[in-house]
């Protein structure tokens, strides 16, 4: 198959591109930054905001069998500080949908558990999303992005799958200046003896090892291209909750250093409790995640060591 990936220089995009190439597919990545991880990922430098504003025209050299749209400003707190970037997320989602419309091909959207907002239940299924309570500008941008995907299915017959990811961690998420995500940040700081601040010690999150995430997306591509699963919104996570204290302890064990941690309340805009119901992904895609956080953290730490990050 020929797969076009937006945001292919990012964490999930790079892992997905490599997995697809290894499986014998043809891949083209588009991103506004070059891929710093693997020169095998064919990358065209394209700014989807410019395409959305029609300041630039771009079309792929071949008709994709499927587009996977991952490009975004992907950090919640950054968009609390700079909400205009959340608007860009919506614009680039529409730009990706326009690429799908021009190529008349199906498209997958990398959405987020943030669309559920702050929920006080442990288990969340896909029908539970109250769009009136967007917790942050990032959350609002994913809600709006999903709405555009649903509208393109209705108005233009563009088949889609929407995946709601949750705290994806693993290789290719370590570039220093972008290291704002909790897992790479804590691994780096704990390993190097720097103090860490834990915002919300009892925050319970569903951490997803990137290989599980990529396996789920690849199953989705196959099912969507074959039209076996179409126009569905699916949680993709591990399906188990861990607190940030658990995360810190697992990192301490893996790196062999005691954390110098201080604890603060959660920051504005943060979701503090989420455990995905992944039964729909299991039922529709045969998705079976097999890397719990207890295994994933040592794997990730080993990868950080192999790359000299710690
Ligand atoms: N990683 C997670 O934990 C997680 C969780 C939920 C949802 N998501 C979503 O999944 C997707 C992929 O996440 P990721 O972790 O790989 O993010 P990432 O930040 O590592 O990668 C996103 C990529 O999009 C690119 N990009 C941003 N704006 C662009 C533009 N205007 N034109 C072209 N490229 C642009 C960036 O340069 C970057 O390489 C994102 O949409 C993110 O919001 C990720």
Image (tube, rainbow, N blue to C red):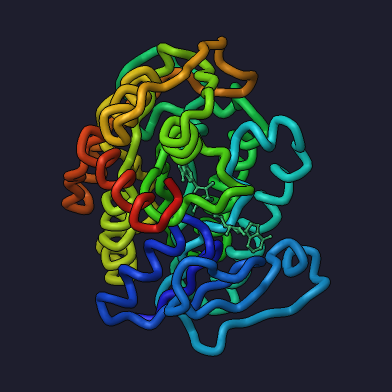
The quarter of the picture where the C terminus appears is top left
Residue 36 pos. (x, y %):
53, 67
- From the viewer's side, name the closer residue of 185 and 143: 185
Residue 196 pos. (x, y %):
52, 23
Q: Residue at x 46, y 19 (%)?
A: 260
Quarter residue 7 falls in: bottom right
Q: Residue at x 47, y 39 (%)?
A: 188
In the image, 152: left or right of 18?
A: right
Tag count: 0
- From the viewer's side, name the closer residue of 303 and 8: 303
Quarter residue 214 falls in: bottom left
Compared with residue 104, is residue 164 higher up or lower down, i.e. above or below? above
Q: Residue at x 27, y 35 (%)?
A: 254
- From the viewer's side, name the closer residue of 33 and 206: 33
Farthest right residue in view: 55
Compared with residue 239, is residue 287 higher up or lower down, i.e. above or below? below
Compared with residue 306, is residue 281 higher up or lower down, i.e. above or below? above
In the image, 178: left or right of 57?
A: left
């Amino acid at each position: 198959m020929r797969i076009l990936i937006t945001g292919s220089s990012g964490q999930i995009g790079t892992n997905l591109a490599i997995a697809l190439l290894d499986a014998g597919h043809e891949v083209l990545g588009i991103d506004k930054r070059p891929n710093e991880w693997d020169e095998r990922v064919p990358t065209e430098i394209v700014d989807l905001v410019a395409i959305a504003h029609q300041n630039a025209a771009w079309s792929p050299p071949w008709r994709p069998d499927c587009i996977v749209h991952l490009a975004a400003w992907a950090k919640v707190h950054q968009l609390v500080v700079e909400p205009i970037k959340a608007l860009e997320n919506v614009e680039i989602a529409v730009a990706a949908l326009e690429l799908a419309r021009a190529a008349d091909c199906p498209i997958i959207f990398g959405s987020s558990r943030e669309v559920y907002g702050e929920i006080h239940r442990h288990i969340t299924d896909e029908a539970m999303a109250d769009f009136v309570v967007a917790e942050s500008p990032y959350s609002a941008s994913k809600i709006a992005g999903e709405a555009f995907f649903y509208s393109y299915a209705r108005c233009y017959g563009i088949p889609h799958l929407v995946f709601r990811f949750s705290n994806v961690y693993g290789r290719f998420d370590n570039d220093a200046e972008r290291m704002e995500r909790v897992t790479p940040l804590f691994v780096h700081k704990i390993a190097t003896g720097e103090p860490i601040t834990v915002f919300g010690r009892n925050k319970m999150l569903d951490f997803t090892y990137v290989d599980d995430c990529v396996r789920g997306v690849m199953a989705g591509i196959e099912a969507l291209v074959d039209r076996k699963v179409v126009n569905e919104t699916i949680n993709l996570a591990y399906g188990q909750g861990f607190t940030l204290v658990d995360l810190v302890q697992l990192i301490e064990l893996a790196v062999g250093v005691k954390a110098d941690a201080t604890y603060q309340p959660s920051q504005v805009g943060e979701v503090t409790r989420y455990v995905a119901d992944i039964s729909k992904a299991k039922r529709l895609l045969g998705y079976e995640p097999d890397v719990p956080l207890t295994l994933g953290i040592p794997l990730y730490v080993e990868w950080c060591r192999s790359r000299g990050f710690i």
